[in-house]
Amino acid sequence: MINIDATTPQLKAVKDLIDAYCSLDISKIEPFISKNFKFQTFPKTIDIPEEAREVHIERYRGILAAVAKLEVRIQHRRTALKLTD
């Protein structure tokens, strides 16, 4: 699990959420999803419809069951700046 010094209630909630996602177990993630959650794409697209909380959770239950490991990497883009006169 993630190593965060959760000394405040806010940091404890963030740590618990990250640990739930890293566990790849949707039942641990469900308590963090609002009861009136509705999945929507932005901008709207006809290929992906809006989904109610239960439908969205069931769809991701199957996806998470197929994933063996979750890794997140952040890549910083190196941009060269040109200085002109």
Image: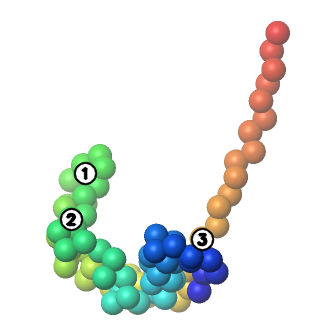
Q: Which residue is mark 2?
A: 38
Q: Residue furthest top?
A: 85
Residue shown at 74%/39% (left/top)?
79
Above or below residue 40? Residue 65 is below
Q: In screen coordinates, is 21 left or right of 2?
A: left
Q: In screen coordinates, is 70 left or right of 74?
A: left
Decide which of 12, 24 is in the foreground and name it.
12
Residue 45 is labelled as 1
Counting from the top left corner in percent of width and height, residue 58 is at 25, 83
Report if residue 71 is visible in the image: no
Number of numbered markers: 3
Counting from the top left corner in percent of width and height, residue 27 is at 33, 90
Q: Amino acid at mark 3?
A: Val
* Distance Cα–Cα, label 2 vs label 1: 15 Å
Above or below residue 37? Residue 85 is above
What secondary structure is marked by label 1?
A: loop
Q: Amino acid at mark 1?
A: Thr
Quarter occupied by residue 53:
bottom left
Residue shown at 28%/55% (left/top)?
41
Q: Which residue is mark 3?
A: 72
* Distance Cα–Cα, label 3 vs label 2: 25 Å
Quarter occupied by residue 47:
bottom left
Of the numbered discs 1 and 3, the one sitting upstream in the chain is 1
Pointer 3 with pointer 2, Cβ within 8 A: no
Q: In screen coordinates, is 53 left or right of 23?
A: left
* Distance Cα–Cα, label 1 vs label 3: 27 Å
Q: Residues within 10 Å of mark 2 (few under 14, many from 20)?
A: some
Decide which of 47, 35 is in the foreground and name it.
35
Q: Residues within 10 Å of mark 3 (few under 14, many from 20)?
A: few
Quarter in which the C terminus is drawn: top right
Of the numbered discs 2 and 1, the one sitting upstream in the chain is 2
